[in-house]
Image (cartoon, helix red, strand yellow):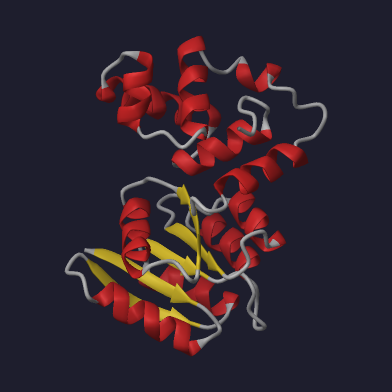
Amino acid sequence: MIRVLLVDDQSVVRAGFRVILNLVDDIEVVGECGDGPTAVDLAERLKPDVICMDVRMPGGDGLSATRRILSRTAADPPQILIVTTFDLDEYVFGALEAGASGFILKDTDPDDLIDAVRRLADGYGLVDQAVTRRVMAEFARRRPASRAGGEAGSLLTGRETEIVRLLARGMSNAEIGRDLFIETSTVKSHLGRIMNKVGTRDRLQTVVWAYQNGVAQPF
């Protein structure tokens, strides 16, 4: 069972998400709140697998809450899904930089919300496809001039670099395997080693790392 915590200052949004997520057998909403500080406390007490986090809340924003939650639960952190109406909100970039594992818009289809929660629970980060290119292009734009990909890229083998660049283009393991003529299981093994080398927790954070360090470029 996937345990979910809902964090949004609008009670009607929380109610809608709760109804959607509780319709499926493998997801359970274990708590909800309307501000960041309360979310930090509930995350420690309830130990959810996934937190659906709003970014703009008058009682405490989702960016600060994301940082505090992940710093306090380093041993077994929840996956944080940023859910917002602002597709290029400054808070969204900050939350992804702070370690959030996914980003979708509030007007996403119910099935896509359910799929997002499941993907994060399985260790797959995601960004809403409607804004993926713009989000990653912004990460690349923010990259310091000193980060040209050389030092960071030296952490990876040639094959690993190829895989990261294809991952940054939104390819699945199977698609990467077909492109490189290797087995899907081999891609998965490579990704595990890549994440250990660069210190990321999931696919999305690996893509963020790649753009921040110049290993991948906007496409």
**Vertical relation: 180 (above or below) 117:** above
Report the quarter where the C terminus lies: top right
Residue 157: image x %, image y %? 51, 12
Residue at the right extreme of this rendering: 145
**Vertical relation: 54 (above or below) 148:** below
Residue at the top extreme of this rendering: 158
Question: Residue at 30% of width from left, 81% of height from top?
Answer: 19
Residue at the bottom extreme of this rendering: 11
Question: Residue at 34% of width from left, 28% of height from top?
Answer: 175
Residue 188: image x %, image y %? 32, 28
Residue 136: image x %, image y %? 62, 42
**Vertical relation: 67 (above or below) 192:** below
Question: Residue at 20% of width from left, 70% of height from top?
Answer: 24
Q: Is residue 141 left or right of residue 50?
A: right
**Vertical relation: 167 (above or below) 154:** below
Q: Nearer the viewer, residue 110 or 152?
A: 110
Report the quarter where the N terminus lies: bottom left
Residue at the left extreme of this rendering: 25
Question: Residue at 56% of width from left, 68% of height from top?
Answer: 84
Which quadrant of the view contains residue 50?
bottom left
Query: Count of labels shown?
Result: 0
Residue 149: image x %, image y %? 68, 22
